[in-house]
Amino acid sequence: MIGRLKGMFLAAPPQTGSHRTGVDIQKRFLIQSEVSSQGSMSRVYKALDTESGKSICLKVLDRDKNDAAQARASRHEERPPEGEIAFQIRHPHVVRTYEHGTTSRGEQYLVMEYLNGISFEQIREGGLARTAEKLEWLAQTAEGLNAVHRAGFIHHDVNPRNFLVARNRERQAKVIDFGLAVPNTPAFRRPGNRTGCLLYMAPELLRREPIDEHIDIFSFGVVAFSLLSGKLPYDSPASPHTLLQRFSLPPNDPQESKPKLSDEVRDVLLKLVAVNKRDRWPSLETLADHLRAIPPKRDAS
């Protein structure tokens, strides 16, 4: 899919946040490069919007895969389109969605801010930051994820690929990808929607128990644990069954793999990944301030 640019940008900018139908994206957008930071459910591009003259991120959803995901998500209620969910969430640490709708081929699409960023996964694997920087990025993404919860949604796919740190001077971190997000309502809290990234799934999700926003808190804890210690809190499972067996044991101690982590960081990480959600960090509302208040004394590595 390669767009075609017709002269200068004479058309008026699009109505920000509008829902459109029948958009010919081959005429509307000039594709500049493919972006690989989001999953297999869609095609994601850096593109030039010929209406506004701005570089944006264009996401086009695979119709068949998303229909299948919709069927898995709930047999009781239809999940809102990803663009509709994403557009409702406005926060400095959540990727901004400007427009959403359907293409002339009947595919869902989103027009979002373009982030030239690096994922938490890449940061962890490359050892690209100090602990103090990682704590600040975790605080920022906790704020972003809390905004998702306050808007009435469960992200449902919290993993290190869905947090990006911009490569600009500010180096801000943002939550991305609402492809599996669902409303935090009774129909979607029912057992059965076992979707997401296995290594980061909460115990109650794997056990097919009723869920709520606490599954995101657990997943965020696994992300934070691995980002700060370099290891997962639970040994890597070969299957959901072996992971459920592992949950019968306490999580690993992050100080075993990263001795310089302070006791304050250790305590937060273990509370975030508590198997019983009653023992888990109760809400992301308070987490960012708590992370920023941790003394930097031993965490400068």
Image (cartoon, helix red, strand yellow):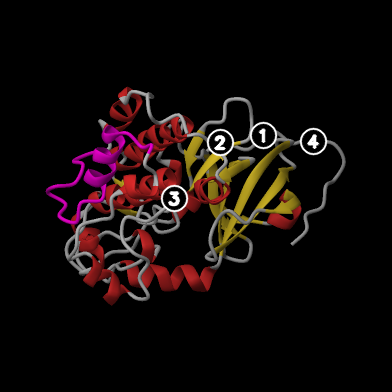
Which of marks 3 and 4 precedes in the sequence? 4
In magenta segment, residue 138:
no
What residue is pinned by disc 3? 230
- Asked if the residues shown at circle 4 and circle 2 are in contact, with their CB atoms under 8 angstroms apart, the answer is no
Foreground tag (3 vs 1)? 3
Would you name the residue on which mark 2 appears? 16
Disc 3 residue type (three-letter): Gly
Q: CA distance from mark 2 to mark 1?
A: 8 Å
Residue 200 in percent (x, y) is at 36, 58
40 vs 297, left or right, is right
Q: What distance separates the C-alpha of mark 4 from that of mark 2? A: 17 Å
Q: Can you tell which mark lies on residue 9?
A: 4
Quarter of the image where one finds residue 285: top left
Q: Give the crowd class for mark 3: few <14, some 14-19, many >=20 residues within 10 Å.
A: some
- Give the distance between the C-alpha atoms of the residues marked 4 and 3, in whole angstroms: 47 Å
Residue 139 rendering spot, x and y as whole percentages: 38, 32
Q: Which residues are magenta?
A: 260-283
Tell me which label, 4 or 2, sits earlier in the chain.
4
Residue 280 is a magenta residue:
yes
128 relative position to 257: left or right: right
Indicate whether 191 appears above or below 145.
below
Q: How dense is the environment of label 1, judged by Cα within 10 Å: few (below 14), some, or many (20 and up)?
A: few
Residue 66, how many percent across, how many down? 47, 67
* Tag 2 near tag 1, CB within 8 Å: yes
Can you tell which mark lies on residue 13? 1
Looking at marks 3 and 2 on the same chain, the residue that comes earlier in the sequence is marked by 2
Q: Residue at x 51, y 73 (%)?
A: 64
Percent position of residue 19, x then y: 51, 47
Q: Are marks 4 and 3 in contact (CB under 8 Å)?
A: no
Observer-nearest residue: 139 or 205?
139
